[in-house]
Image (tube, rainbow, N blue to C red):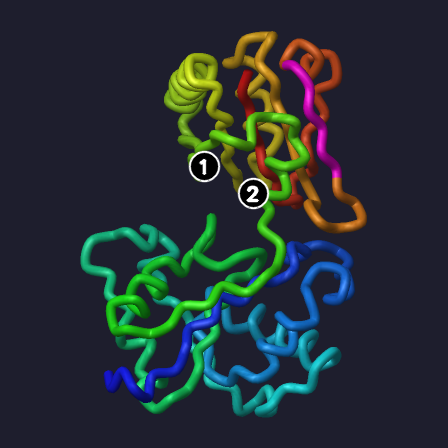
Amino acid sequence: MNATALGKLFLVPTPLDFLCDTQVPLSQVLPLATVQTASQIDHWVVENAKSARAFLKRVDAVSPLRVPLQAQQINELPRLVHKKGDWVAGVDMRGMLQAASQGHDIGLLSEAGMPAVADPGSSVVRAAHDVGMQVLPLVGPSALLLALAGSGLNGQQFAFGGYLPQDAAERSLRLKALEQHALKTGETQVFIETPYRNAAVLAALLHSLHDHTRLAVCSHVSLPEMRIQSMQVAQWKRHPQAPDKTTPAVFAFGP
């Protein structure tokens, strides 16, 4: 690519109401500058084209799109990235950034929250750096940081562990190892789960963790139904109410 003519890569956050029954106005969760920047982009790399178009319709209602929705150039990330992750050997996304060589800015979009953080997209960001593009993350919601801030757990030292193992025995071993590390170092452990496994994960947490460990469960983050509960496992055992099976949740625990 010709470095003198390269477009920029914008990391565009989206509201956290994906798959929720109701949507919040963009003005409540995204700064106007973020919405206006998104409205001027017409080349996209996205997690899902359908949800990307739905987001752009919401953008258009606030700040008119520079190019009509039907003329937007939208490229989906390959299924390999969804199934095996951005760090799988051989993933090279430079081909998805070809429009930048003609001076077009490109937007990176996930279905909810900040792309490339607990969502696909880091391989695109890495490719952009490799070809010399400027990478510009825009301001918007990140469920992980909002949940951590509201948890009362250590926000100075924390680790995001992604998803827990699906096998019950393996998951229990993993939780006990993470708890031992957290109690030794003070490091908060943060992870997410597929919504339909919320109840199973909460049950596993209550079974595997010590009674004095603090556990936070955060759902509908940044939305009107936002719920953040943080208490010791012993208290959770008396009130073991999990988020519903359709609500994305963030779990965190530590001393």
Residue at the spot 70% in from the left edge and 71% down from the top edge: 32
Q: Are marks 1 and 2 in contact (CB under 8 Å)?
A: yes
Label for residue 160? Answer: 1
Residue at the far right: name it. 224
Side (left or right) of 133 relative to 141: left
- Give residue 163's position: percent from left, percent from top: 44, 37
Report the Cα–Cα distance between label 1 and label 2. 8 Å
Residue at the spot 48% in from the left edge and 30% down from the top edge: 157
The N terminus, quarter of image: bottom left
- Give residue 200's position: percent from left, percent from top: 57, 27
- Amino acid on which disc 2 is placed: Leu
- Residue 219 visible in the displayed image: yes
Q: In the rendered view, would you say 46 is above or below 176? A: below
Q: Nearer the viewer, residue 226 or 171?
A: 226
- Amino acid on which disc 1 is placed: Phe
Side (left or right) of 110 relative to 57: left
Task: Name the N-terminal-most of marks 1 and 2.
Answer: 2
Our reading of the magenta stretch's main secondary structure is strand
Residue at the far left: name it. 90
- Give residue 46's position: percent from left, percent from top: 46, 69
The C terminus, quarter of image: top right
> Dot 1 surroundings within 10 Å: few (below 14), some, or many (20 or more)?
some
Mark 2: secondary structure: helix
Q: In the rendered view, would you say 30 is above or below 230? A: below
Label for residue 144? Answer: 2
Residue at the spot 68% in from the left edge and 40% down from the top edge: 219
Q: In the rendered view, would you say 152 is above or below 184? A: below
Range covered by the magenta-colored residues: 227-232
Q: Nearer the viewer, residue 179 or 35?
A: 35
In the picture, residue 214 is in which quadrant?
top right
Mark 1: secondary structure: strand
Whether 146 is among the magenta residues is no
